[in-house]
Image (spheres, rainbow, N blue to C red):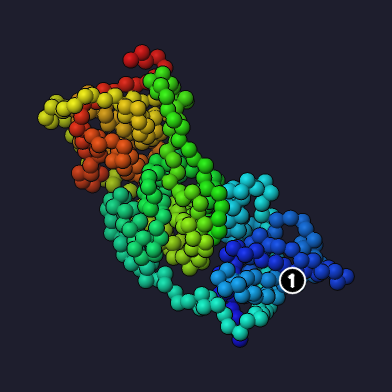
Amino acid sequence: MIITLGAIRDCFEGAIPAVIATCSPDGTPNVTLLSQVHYVDDDHVALSFQFFSKTRENVLANPHAMIQVIHPDSGTHFYLSLQYLRTDTEGPLFEYMKAKLAGVASHTGMSKVFRLRGSDVYRVLDIQCPSDTLPTSAMRPHQQLPALRSCSRAISGHTDLGALLDDLLAGLQSQFDIRHVMVMMHDPVGARLYTVASCGYPESGVGSEVALGDGVVGVAAQERTPIRIGYMTSDYAYSRAVRHNLANQTADDIETEIPFPGLSEPHSQMAVPILSGDRLYGVLYVESSEDMRFNHEDEDALVTLTGQLALAIQVITQAGGDAPEVRRVTGRTAAPLRGTAIAVRRFPANNSVFIGDDYLIKGVAGAIFWKLVNDYAQNGRTEFSNRELRHHPALCLPDITDNLEARLILLQRRLAERCSFLRIEKTGRGRFRLQVDRPITLRDMAPDNSA
């Protein structure tokens, strides 16, 4: 029976550690565990080189080794005879393996220990299996192509970024049966990612942030390579502090982190950067409470899908900047508002905004919201355009079109979740309306503001 590497790729997922055996020139054997066995193609694998160990010494002197890998579902053992060829210390293969190792290390507190020195590339000379038949899962038919085709059709032709993201999430649920998904956009100025869409969680977590290099999501973004982990790791430790006496606190005293909406115990995780060439738009993050939920075919499919997603985002955001500026209308024409006025407060140090005692948003989205409610309070304006925001000097927006589009979606969805009487409604290409259903009073909490 001829066994190909492609048929046993599930053995390289890391659920069961691989074992490598080498031999010194004098015939002394050495056996140890491996951190990673990476499928390169049907003739080659790459093994992680992390330490100047006896294995490394043996391979450089005698370039032959044997590894044992075990299928995670059936427990079938496979033995691969290898010939050492080279060590890569840069390039796509090295960056992929380094990013995956860093993603695991960032969760386990081993970042200073789990550092990849190189990717050792081996030619596979032979594959042996003591069993007469391969595991059935190793021969399962490809199911991702029909799902990929359907999702690709669903996200094509969009002119609205919010609708695009909603259809993406719906497609991942219905076609790939992926239930827990987040889309995080890249903020190049703050070197962070922020959540703009999610599904499968009790709280959406829209507005939650992850720094580049932090955890699976941050490392995938920083290294611009997908990371897939098929077993239990620690989750992000985001928390939200209880707020007391907000009126007497400064922006630095107030906890304004939005909780990360991830599973408390994810057993499978995959983070795929949303890339168009060298441009990073964000990260698509999926997770599951099942071990080994995502395989290499899922990774290939989502990498392809995020490539199309990046192009769709680029088209939408470039087209969104062409809408003409809205004429500034003064004077109040709306019916009188009813109810007790509620305070909207801004802390200018980081543009964090509170509606009553409830934290809404901060940063760029906070600055945008403060501009909108000020125009409403002073002039009765409710109609706005993306173009005027983009060129407004007080906002100091970065010269990146999609940053504004994504921030508006973030603000729109935070308002929908946190405030029933303030809404942002899209009225056309590059245009939107601020809908106010209750009296508001504005308080700028600058240090010298006695209000």
From the viewer's perspective, is 297 left or right of 335? right
In the image, what residue type sits under mark 1? Ala
Quarter-of-image position of residue 214:
top right
x, y percentage for residue 284?
43, 54
Looking at the image, residue 356 lies above or below residue 125? above
Q: For mark 1, what is the residue?
A: 65
**Residue under the point 45% across and 44% down:** 260
Q: Quadrant of the N terminus?
A: bottom right
Looking at the image, residue 433 lies above or below residue 134? above
Quarter-of-image position of residue 344:
top left
Compare residues 359 and 423 and report the one nearer the observer: 359
Compare residues 72 and 217 and report the one nearer the observer: 72
Quarter-of-image position of residue 255:
top left
**Residue under the point 31% across and 33% down:** 369
Q: Quadrant of the C terminus?
A: top left
**Residue under the point 43% across and 21% down:** 249
From the viewer's perspective, is 398 left or right of 392? right
Q: Is residue 428 visible?
A: yes
Residue extending furthest toward the bottom: 1
Looking at the image, residue 345 lies above or below residue 98? above
Compare residues 153 and 7 and report the one nearer the observer: 7
Q: Is residue 396 visible?
A: no
x, y percentage for residue 375?
24, 28
**Residue under the point 47% across and 25% down:** 252
Secondary structure under tag 1 reads strand
